[in-house]
Image (cartoon, rainbow, N blue to C red):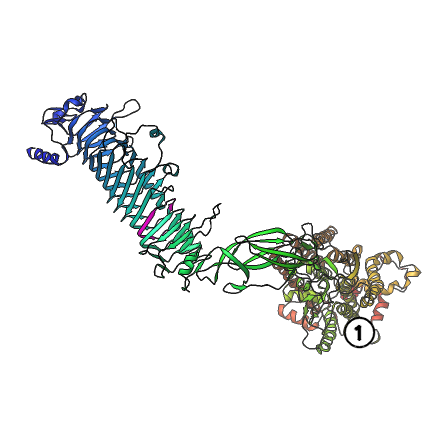
Amino acid sequence: MPLLLVVVLLFFSSSCSVSSAQYYVSDDCSSVTQSPCNPLSVYAGNMSQYNNTIFYFIGTSVINFIVTMDSVQNITLHGLDQSPTIRCINDHQLKSYIRITTSSHVCFSNLSFQQCGIFFRHSSNITITGSIFKSQRWRSGLTNVFDSKITSSVFDNVVYIQYISPRVCYNELHHYSLTLTNVTVTNNKLSFDMHHGTSYNISVILDNVNIISSSMSGISYWFTISLFSLYITNSSVSNSEHGFYSRFYINLYFHGYKFCNIKGVESRSTVAIEDSQFYNNRIVALSFRILRNFFQTSNHHIDFTVKSCSIRDSDYGLLIAGGFSTLAHISVIDTELAGNKRNDIGGCLSILLNNVTVANSLSTGLVIIASVVTVENRLVFKNNTGVVGGGMAINSSSVVALSPSANLEFIDNHATYKGGGIYIDDKIKSDYNLYSVFYILPLPTLKTITFKGNTAGVAGNDMYGVDSKLQNAFSGVKELSTSSDASAFAFCDPDSNETTTIWYDDEQQSVFPGQPLKYNVALFGRSSDAYSYSVTDGRITIEINGTSVIDKYINNCSLIEYTPKFINYGEHNVSLTDTSYRIQLNISFILNECPFGFSVNSSGFCDCSVSRENVTCDINTLDITHNGLLWIGTYHTSTPFNANSTNPNACIINEDCLLYCSPNPVIFQFNHTDTQCVDDRGHRMCGSCTEGYSLLMGSNKCGHCHNNYMMIAWIGLFAVMGVLLVALLIALNLTVSVGTLNGLLFYANIVKLYEPVFSRKGALPVLSQVISWINLDFGFEICFYNGMDSYAKQWLQFAFPLYLWIIIIIIIQLCRRYGKISRLMGSHAVPVLSTLTFLSYTKLVRTIVIVLHKCEVTLHCTDESVRSVSLWYEDPNVEYAKGKHAGLFGFALLVSVFFIIPYTLFLLCHPVFEKYLSHFKLFKSWSRFKPIIDAYSGPMKDEYRFWPGLLLVTRIPVLLIVTFLKNESRVMLLTVAASILSFSFIFGGVYRRKLNNIIEFWFLFNLCIMASLSIAFTDENEVLIWYNTCLSVFAFSFILIVVYHLYLQLSYIKCYDALIKKLFKKQDEDHNPLDVTESHLTVDQQMREIVPSSTDVRLSDSRESVVDLFLT
């Protein structure tokens, strides 16, 4: 313990005054061996009686009252043990703190204050050392504390230091000091207020003061016109809102206060910051601000110096607002500004930059606004970025003067807009027409400024805003990239890699209303070379006939577009004007009438002359767009057409096109209307093949014909195929007389009619060929001859059925005359003829409908007339019932009158004739048709002999529906198929044999499924799947029927029957096969035996059919 007292005494001899009396303070004096010992409350009642006293604090002293030291001298409060603490109790009713007023030589050492405020007022020689102040609520305040020092202490609250006028004015100038050494402030700030005028001079020294993580300013310095000096050295402020924030201002509270100013004393404030760091501050690292309205009327001198400091990684690094004070001088020396977002100097009329480095700034390295800056020695800008001015921006009539020793370096700076190295604001919009100036004094040399690796997004990689002095300085540097505000403009070539100037554009533009006028224009500013220009940006206005129509920003070689509305057709004047220097260029353009297919709409632009939903017209490209299944073009497609011309005599067709037009959206022009077509088709409404293509047999597509002599081979092939078809029908007895083909033929005919409705892509080739062959179509896509069109194809459609009829008629005639031939053919001649006629019926009806199908087309002509023309639907290039179509039209009518109508009535009404009219003499020859009637109706029950005629007649409305009502055809087909299926089911089967009823039911049911699927699925991929699936089922069913007929034919052969008996080792005594070797009657003999000699015999009494004859 004596050793401890010796150490304390030695410490006091250097930091605190030595006192005569000693007291011990503790809330638990029972554990203290020294005396006297009492709680602090015992001594705090009247501290003035304890002058020249040392209070030793042991342990924790808790106070719930105010400790006041008023007019005390030479008092020391010292903590003895490891953690001597004074803790204050504060709540909403109770307040406790420590207050020292009008005292001197008061010392606090080695103490920890918790939640205690400590206030010094009008005192001197105050010492705080080795102490800790922890309080989130109370601040530490010093008001007019002179010749005092705070050392080796930590503050966790606000340290507020204030100097105001003294209570008693002095006759002479007094000098005081305040020193803070090795002081740390956490979670708060160090704040100074200087409002004492010239009543005394105060010198504040901050040495090794560190402020960390302040939620406010780190060091806040507020002052009015006062005599003081602030010296900060070896200090730092980090992670605060403001690092160092100083402000010269008018305090209204102190403005009315009477200062004890001493006459003859110059008013001066000095702030010097050396060897300090300000970093990671959220708003400003170092800020200095002078209010303009106050210092303009005062003669107060201010010196602000920043030397050898590091200001980095903050939002604003250096922010100086000089308030345009003529008595403020600011110096920044040997300082680094790095990693800050921005550094600003504004309103400073005297600022010196000496050996300053600005690097890695994010929003311009240094912005100088309305200031006068002098540069001495090095000023380096490196790797800064900004919008205008990457390294430095000189704005608002600022002046930057380079002393003879100055050396500026701009390295790797970038501006996204202008001035990668330097941006100089050429001209300020004001009444005085002021300029920003960059002076180099004395006569400049190229070594004064260094530019390297600077870039700018628009203009002036190294410098933007060149004045005449700089122009002379850099006139010999070719590598220097400089520019300025636009002083000239010209037309340019946009396709050039560089901005190639076209000073005169003699080409007169000609446009339609709605087409843009296009001018490629570049603006040029002054470069470092007095005799050259560099590309820059700016604004250009356009006037048409004296009326301003556009004001546009121009950058590099930019396109100016203006879309004129309808004014008057003819020549009009255009004026282009640069907004900076009012340079004007006059040119002209011609406004033409809208081209063919376009007309002026209500907006004054050219648009589609014939309006239609989902059709758009683009006057700029002359393109027309629609969603498909539509044809738009001229009536005379064979006449050469120019889409850019008006074509006063042309007419437009705007019609639906469901056959050969693309179902997908198309874009085309009037001189390329074939774009709307598919399958190599073209011309009017895609009705014929394009040049070099011919219509193919087996489909409606167009293709190339490679050999003109192939037609002979195809004719021979068709002839052979006809003979083979007849032979096949005879050999397998594939005729309607058996009853297995009615449902199959009905299904195949309907599917062929609905083929373009069910699937535009069509079925698989094998399946499609099966359907085609049953409908007497070729099935293969071949070129019959070069140049074949729809007209010739329809003649061929008539030719093949007639050819088959001729074959079978020849066979019948040969059978009538020659028994051997009749014996060879068997009893199949008449049924085969009936079957071929039945097969040909649908094909001929379909061909007739195609030939007679007419489309009425409305023509919209450019002379505003509207008329209608009749065209052949299959090929709209052919006029209906005129020219070559007239012969085809007449033949189709003949076939209708002499075959289709009589055959339909014959097959539908023959039961009525047989039952009620056959005994009349007028119908005596009716019995000659009985073999044909029996071929159709023989398999039917007597009461349903009308059924083949009903199925035949049903094909006609189905064909008309699919031809004229494509959108509703699927539902109508389902209705028809379901109705026939229902009738067949209600009748309990119309065929005598149950197998025939099952077969027909199966095909009708399959047709209903196909119609239902076509309604349910519309996606093309899904349609293709179910369509081919249904046809596969049909093809398999067809094969089974052929196999069944083959079995029937083989079963009549003796050797076949013997082979069957041998294989299965059984005898069928009831089996009585037909002896094909017995003598066979001719066709005439068959008819005479079948038909009674008297027509009075009623059909119900005795009825034998050809089928009965053949099968019994």
Q: Quadrant of the N terminus?
A: top left
Residue 942 is a magenta residue? no
Q: Main secondary structure of the magenta part?
A: strand
Q: Which of the 4 quarters of the picture holds residue 167?
A: top left
Residue 721 point in image, percent of width and height:
72, 73
Q: Quadrant of the C terminus?
A: bottom right
Residue 1006 point in image, percent of width and height:
67, 56
Image: 647 above or below 819: above
According to the image, label 1 marks what residue?
822
Which stretch is magenta?
Answer: 345-361
Residue with the most extreme right position: 921
What amino acid is labelled 1 in the image?
Ser
Q: Nearer the viewer, residue 286 or 7?
A: 286
Tell me how many marks there are: 1
Q: Nearer the viewer, residue 1079 or 877?
A: 877
Q: Which of the 4 quarters of the picture holds residue 180?
A: top left
Residue 455 point in image, percent of width and height:
42, 58
Residue 149 point in image, percent of width and height:
20, 36
Residue 740 is left or right of residue 900, and the answer is left
Task: Determine whether the residue tagged by mark 1 lies in a helix, strand or loop.
Answer: helix
Q: Nearer the viewer, residue 555 or 675?
A: 555
Q: Badge 1: few (under 14), some or many (20 or more) residues near its Cα, within 10 Å?
A: many
